[in-house]
Amino acid sequence: MKQKVKSTPLRLRSPPVVEANHLYCYNLPEIVYLIAYLCAVIQYDKYEAVIGLEVHAQLLTKSKLFCGDSAAFGGDPNTHISPITLAHPGTLPMMNKQAIEHAIKLGLTLRCDIEQQNYFARKNYFYPDLPKGYQVSQHTTPICKNGHVKIKVEDTERNIRLNRIHIEEDAGKSLHDVDENFTAIDLNRAGVPLLEIVSEPDLHSSDEAFAYLTELRKLVRWVEVCDGNMEEGSLRCDANVSVRLKGDIKLGTRVEVKNLNSIRNVKRAIDIEIKRLIEIVESGNKVIQETRSFDADNNTTFSLRSKEEADDYRYFPEPDLTPFNITDEFLQQVKESLPALPEALEKKYKDVFQLSDYDAQMICQDKTMVDYFEATIKHSNHYKAVVNWLIGPVKSYLNHHNIELNGFALKPQQIAALVQLIDDGKVNFNIASTRIFEALLKETNKEPLQIATELNLIQDSNADNLAVWVDEVIAKMPDKVKEYKSGKKGLIGLFAGEVKKISKGKADMQLVNKLLAEKLN
């Protein structure tokens, strides 16, 4: 006898919100309803996301913020430490001047107001991996205020306002996978200087957040204050996300997603949180202010801790560090040390060198590319051709071998010489970008002309020689000549290919095509 299965009648209601630590069992009708509800009822596009980002950039200083211990990444655990890093009694901090200089550099780059009268404060918050038990940071007087980062998404440009940039020391690192019973602590990173860059809640999509972080990473590397390596943790991002109805001016309850270690993961985590928050609001539930983390493996976020109220860190001025004054002279020195910035260079390359928007943007994506381009055009005024080489064969080689441009074996003048070989008609681009370029990379002490001569690659531009090859090809292909003359003009490529074969690739193909057109017509 079959047992009857009693089903729950379908009711028109909002589905419950499922958190990661709760298990809710649906029967089949409820599953069907849930899918229909999520797909048809929730109108995601009636909501607007409001996003603010907090980015921590590790400064490129040799030593830590308040002592002479190495600030280099890596090293055996607990080797970049001293009594000051370990907060032994009687030890005193000493300010790192270069950290202040780097902070000002970035502030000027991002058009911030520089706070010249400044001091550090103690932030009383227990860090298991910060030996002092408090963090030295800035509170009332962040070194940089206001400013903005310009972004472009599709065809729309916007300035994303900054709230502040302040200097602080990093904590150490807790390692949970070294011992199954204990958490291990590596204090090499404790005390390393950071800049915390806090945006206003001006971002409204993951695409805008992606563009903001991409531009910010480019700029910190451009002015050489941070290497921007998110995999090594020298650039870290926390995202504050909330949602509200479009047209509403009141901010919704926000959640913070911590320690996102790639720009792509920032985008993914924001998309997940926007969707999750909208579904919570639509189901009639209340968004809880909390701190969450992102699991990149299963593409989910999960709760770390609730955060109903703002933390009271009981800031007070750091008694072991005197206030510091940034003089007008020092500010001017830092300003004069700044390199030309991407926006100004793009304009110069378009206005003076007549490059396209695309070419100017490609060259200005990276400071090392600009430096190499500038060095190359000292030896060549063929600006467009130089760009084609840098964003073509050179970039392809770098990507294939996973190396940076500053580790590229060829000198700028060798690229300029390759450009000149083509312009002089001695070789074509195809031969130069494959055979000569590849040979140069194996024998970097040689010049392109020397390589081309040794490999017998110099183009033959002698009109008499070319005419002999052209006549030979036309004579052995009478049927194709008839077809060409009857209207199949595309066959000229066939004739040119045969000339190329006969000449073993040495014929000047521009002249060959001209001769073919004259004789066939």
Image: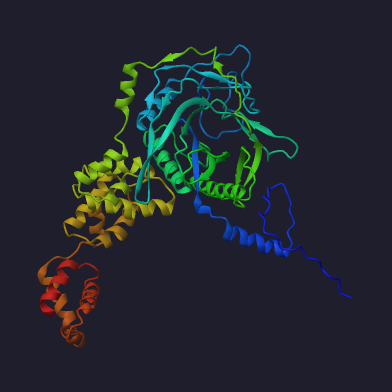
Q: Please tell me in which quadrant of the rendered image residue 489 appears.
A: bottom left
Left or right of 326, for residue 194: right
Left or right of 82, for residue 95: left
Query: What percent of the width, then of the height, locates residue 312?
Result: 61, 23
Query: What percent of the width, then of the height, locates residue 35?
Result: 63, 61
Number of marks present in the image shown: 0
| Vertical side of 444 occupied by 41: above or below | below
Query: What percent of the width, then of the height, locates residue 311?
Result: 61, 27
| Vertical side of 449 occupied by 208: above or below | above
Q: Please tell me in which quadrant of the rendered image residue 430 appears.
A: bottom left
Q: Nearer the viewer, residue 176 or 321?
A: 321
Residue 375 visible somewhere in the drawing: no
Residue 514 visible somewhere in the drawing: yes
| Residue lying at 60% horizontally and 33% vertically, measured from the top left | 76
Left or right of 418, for residue 471: left
| Residue lying at 35% horizontally and 45% vertically, measured from the top left | 157
Query: What percent of the width, then of the height, locates residue 301?
Result: 61, 46
Quadrant assignment for the C terminus: bottom left
Figure coloring: rainbow
| Residue lying at 54% horizontally and 15% vertically, measured from the top left | 318
